Structures are given as structure tokens and as C-alpha cells.
Amino acid sequence: MRLVVVAHGTRQLLGNAVASIIAKRAGRVLGMESKAAYVELCEPLLTDVLADGQPSVVVPLLLSTGYHIKVDLPQAAEGLPVAMGRALGPDPLLASAQVSRLVNAGAVPGQPVVLVAAGSNDPSARADIAEAGLMLEKAWGGPVRVATVSGSGAPAIDQVVRPGDAVSPYLLAPGFFSDLVRSRASAAGAEIVADVIGPHPDVIELVVRRAAALLAEERSAQAG
């Protein structure tokens, strides 16, 4: 059995490296072979990785439910010895990682924060993003508002960010969306724009937990 983490993929090398780092670190903790794959824009694609038929547990590095989680990933795993996990977010461990990035960027307790997600037109994704905002507010201990770069269900950055706010990108890796978040938030008067979540230790812990749960489910099903 191996661990496969699957990210969306970007044309930026640094962005794609995040998935590779997470795969290596989580695999090391689990004592498993590990590999990073991508939905699009970068190789290896998940379909190509799974095509060898090796039994795998797949942990998506996607922060909310949407088309990729509902359609693309199940299709890629169909008929194969694969245990597929759910979207990585929302989760308190992601909120904890965001707090760490905010503090590292210079944000202070109580400072208003805007969580900015990529956005989606999928109602499930919009609900996940709203929940992520609530989790960050609890972890941060101060007011958190939510904005998105695109999609419906949440206002745009320039409608939410106020002068003096700190901005927390609800994004796992640098890329096109993180560049937009930084430029638009700064233009709207944000005092601080934190880094993307990245391969934070809390993210590694979350991936390890998700993979361990999938492995336990597989063992239980085989025993039954």
C-alpha cells in the first residue's frame, strides 16, 4: 500500500513542489511509499499514477468539496484498488496553520482578518469555505470575514478587505490565485498578507491522520 497525495496543479514550479514536500514528509511519518500527483496542469497526473494498479490510499490536497472531489477523483480511481479520501478542508488543523502564517507575517491577536479562498460555484464548496472562516475565527480569537477570488457565494476581495486588515490566503500552494490575493488585498488596503498555508507541520499531521483513517477502514473491510 502506498500514499498518494493529489493537488490541483499549477504552472508554477514552487506551487507544485508543495505537494511533493507534503507527500515525502507524510510518507516518512507513516513509513509508507509516497507520491504526489495532480489533477491538471502538472505531471504526473493522478490518472497516470494510479494506472499501474498499485494499491493506494489517496489524500486530496484540495481545501473544499467541488467538481474535482465529486467527479474527477472518483473517476480516476474507478475500478482500481484505491481508498479515496475526502477534501482536506475545512479542518481545525488548517486553521491552526493559518494562524501560524498570520503570526509569522506580523499579524497581532485581535487584528481583523479576512480569509480569502479561491472560490467556487458549487454550494458544497461555498459551505466548506464558510466553515473554514468560522474555524479560523475560533483559532485566531478575533473577527474573521470571508472573501473569494472567483465564484459565487462570497464577496470579492475588494468588497471585504479594509485598511488595516490582515489577509489569510486559504490556499495550499503559491500560484495564480495566491498572486491575485496578494495584489488585490494590497490594493484594497490590507496591512498584512500572510503566506499560503504550504507544507506546514499541521498540514502534514492532517494528511497523516487522513491516510491512517483510510488504512484503518481498508483493514477493517478486509477483516470483515
Image (spheres, rainbow, N blue to C red):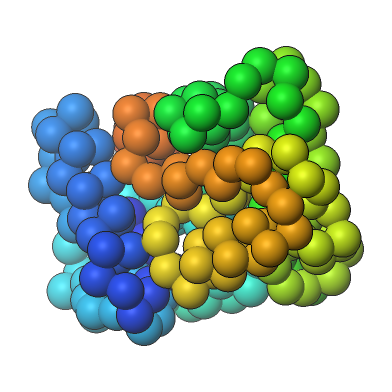
Residue toward you, 42 or 187: 187
Left or right relative to 174: residue 129:
right
Q: Is residue 159 left or right of residue 44?
A: right
Task: Say which of 166 and 168 sits in front.
Answer: 166
Q: Residue at x 33, y 63 (%)?
A: 15
Using the image, determine if residue 154 lies above or below residue 150.
Answer: above
Q: Position of residue 16 (x, y in %)?
A: 29, 65
State the residue at coordinates (63%, 57%). 186
Say if 121 sits above or below 25 in the image.
below
Position above or below: 207 against 100: below
Q: Where does the image place residue 117, in percent across and percent down from the top left?
A: 66, 56
Give the image quarter of residue 4.
bottom left
The residue drawn where x is 77% and y is 31% is 112
Drawn side of residue 107 relative to residue 85, left or right:
right
Question: How many numbered tags mark residues here?
Answer: 0
Residue 101: x %, y % from top left: 47, 33
Q: Quadrant of residue 223?
A: top left
Quarter of the figure with residue 50: bottom left
Q: Nearer the viewer, residue 42 or 136?
A: 136
| Between 180 and 72, the one nearer to me in the picture | 180
**Which quarter of the figure is the C terminus placed in?**
top left
x and y, in percent, of residue 220 in the image: 40, 31
43 relative position to 149: left or right: left
Residue 82 visible in this rendered orientation of the protein: no
* 88 w.r.t. 124: above or below: above
Does the rendering let one see residue 175? yes
Give the residue at x 19% y 38%.
Answer: 25
